[in-house]
Amino acid sequence: MITCADAPNRVLSWDGGALVEHPAGPLADGRACARAALFADMDGDGREELYILNEPVAGTVPTPDRLFACFGNRWIDLAALPENFPAANRAAGTALACIDRHGTGRYGIVVGGEGVPLQLFELDRRGRLHEVAEEAGLDIEADARLLLGSCLTGSLPDLFVGCANGPNLLFRNLGGGQYEEVADEVGLDDPFTNAGAATILDADGDGLVDLLLGNAEGPHRLFQHRAGGGFVDVAPPEMAQAGDVRAVIAADFDK
């Protein structure tokens, strides 16, 4: 899936030797201006839905985000259904992530924006869309540049929010679908930089999840997870050197 800001979205697959383009049908959504997309199983049926974050287009009515579900060979925008349309996001967003806050295999979609509270969209068992950030403890205002759902502090999925113009946020999963914000407590707030991109890795092979954070302005960070809890930046000078980062990748390059 390739989302496009100034052209219809595209659907491609790999046939073993080359990329093959397929008719996109309703996924093309040529009138919208897509910024990002994310696949997640929101209804727990084993097949992923597709959430597309749309940007407002100057001089037009705001285009709501899309939530496509596949029924047989047909894709239907659940967010456009009459019962879901009032809950669909129409605000400008900057980042997406998915979290399974209850650990049941039913994922919610987190939407971050510029200087607005985070939003969390979930489907109930009848297929109704709900915004439940306040219920989960995630409705904190942030200038979100990236969202990362991962088990950073324990065995339950947390949510890291890389921010501009203010400290980063880390929402620790308390269980029962509830979160608390602990970035300052664990050393991930990094308040004087603007986050650009992040990924998780085990940098030192100790079995704990570390965080690589590329900043758009200021030094980059390699936050190492300490056995006693909390994180400390151990980025060497070559890695920390400031640069306008938009993406980071972690891999075991030397195996």
Image (cartoon, rainbow, N blue to C red):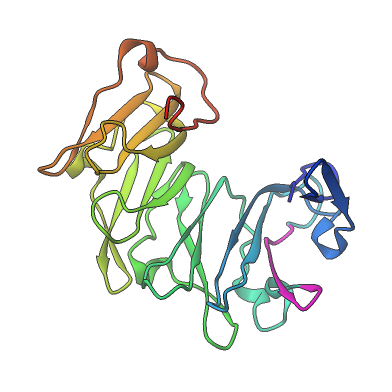
Residue 241, picture quadrant = top left
Q: Residue at x 49, y 67 (%)?
A: 108
The answer to whether one can see residue 192 in this image is: no
Q: Residue at x 74, y 47 (%)?
A: 3
Residue 179, picture quadrant = bottom left
In the image, residue 16 above or below residue 167: below
Q: Residue at x 51, y 24 (%)?
A: 245
* Secondary structure mostly taken by the magenta-highlighted segment of the chain: strand
146 with respect to 50 (left or right): left
In the image, residue 4 above or below residue 61: above
In the image, residue 83 above or below residue 19: below
- Residue 128: horizontal and vertical position, in percent? 59, 82
User: What number of labels is visible?
Assistant: 0
Residue furthest toward the left?
A: 228
- Residue 102: horizontal and vertical position, in percent? 36, 73
**Residue 208 painted magenta:** no
- Residue 37: horizontal and vertical position, in percent? 65, 52
- Residue 167: horizontal and vertical position, in percent? 33, 37
In the image, residue 135 above or below residue 149: below
Identify which residue, 157 or 77, lies in the foreground. 157
Quarter holding the C terminus is: top left
Identify which residue, 253 or 144, lies in the foreground. 253
Magenta span covers which residues?
Answer: 63-75
187 with respect to 145 (left or right): left
**Residue 68 painted magenta:** yes
146 with respect to 77 (left or right): left
154 with respect to 29 (left or right): left
Identify which residue, 85 or 126, lies in the foreground. 126
The answer to whether one can see residue 201 in this image is: yes
Q: Residue at x 44, y 34 (%)?
A: 164
